[in-house]
Amino acid sequence: MSYFASTRCDLYYEDTAETDPSGQEKPVVLFVNGWAVSSRYWKPLANLLSANYRCITYDQSGTGKTIIKGNPTFSIQGFTDEAGELIEHLGLQKSRKLHIVGHSMGGMVATELCLRYRNALLSSTIVACGIFEETLFTSLGLFFLGGLIDVSLNFRNIFQVEPLKSMFIKRAASKEISQEYHDILIEDFTQSNKEATIAVGKFSIDRDSLRTYTRHVLYIASPVLCCVGMADNTIPPEGTLTLYKKRKAESESPTHLAKFMDLGHLPMLEDTPRFAGELTKHFEFAEQFWKSKL
């Protein structure tokens, strides 16, 4: 557990190599969080993977234990910059040892990191961060969703009280998760920095940002795994399926799909062993892919 002084924040991160020195020699997995949550929800997954991988989690500006300095810009570029500074602080840009996993909004940031550190990248995994055909219906849906973000942030403390507390979790997770992480998700959402949380929510559905994200996913030269819970009530799973099909059709680099029929928006908590298994298969494939290039 450490802090790193970036140009925009004192960034809190956890690195399994701090408690296991042998982790320095292992392939690295960097986890990029979704909207309005700290890095704590990755812990069960990191615990499972840490026997074979050096796992790094961090709290983005506006969440968890990270301390904002001044008035940073809450944008995809800004979040990419702070994660990039952490990558360089840890020296992870120096060799091809890096797997990047981005969840929800974190998939957009992860994609930018994959392009910025393409020479260090072994693989990319995008979880529940898709694209949609641009129609009048989807445009109206995004417009109303933008308004809902403002409203939900103004009244978010109501989610600390039952039955709204349980309703909030059930919308994110289709299967039961432990009470510990039930409470963590509520705490993170209700205590996140309001300005950052609204900004992140807005750019996640901004049309121009989504177009850029779509193009950039196609540019990733390393193997990409698209993960989707088909019971996701937070982000329609069709978006991730569309992203997978588009990259599969248009990219020369390998693209795979992990589809969980009974899981929702939080597969890393809903069925940690199964999700870890899919990641491990992808990581092993990517490592062999790059060895074949030598």
Image (tube, rainbow, N blue to C red):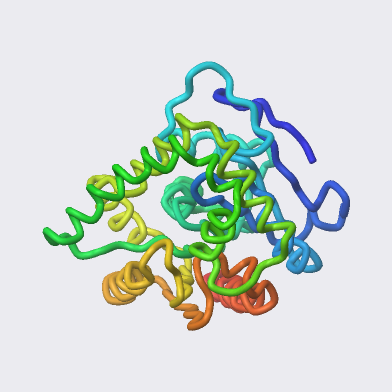
| Residue 291 visible in the snapshot | no
| Residue 72 visible in the snapshot | yes
On-image quarter of the N terminus: top right
Camera-side residue of 279 and 160: 160
Q: Position of residue 177 (x, y in %)?
A: 66, 67
On-image quarter of the C terminus: bottom right
Task: Classify 155 as above or below 183.
Answer: above
Residue located at (69% from left, 35% from top)? 65
Task: Classify 191 as above or below 114.
Answer: above
Residue located at (74% from left, 57% from top)? 180
Camera-side residue of 52 and 232: 232
Camera-side residue of 159 and 185: 159
User: Is 76 left or right of 177, judged from the image as shown?
Assistant: left
**Residue furthest to the bottom:** 261
Q: Position of residue 220 (x, y in %)?
A: 40, 60
Residue located at (68% from left, 52% from top)? 183
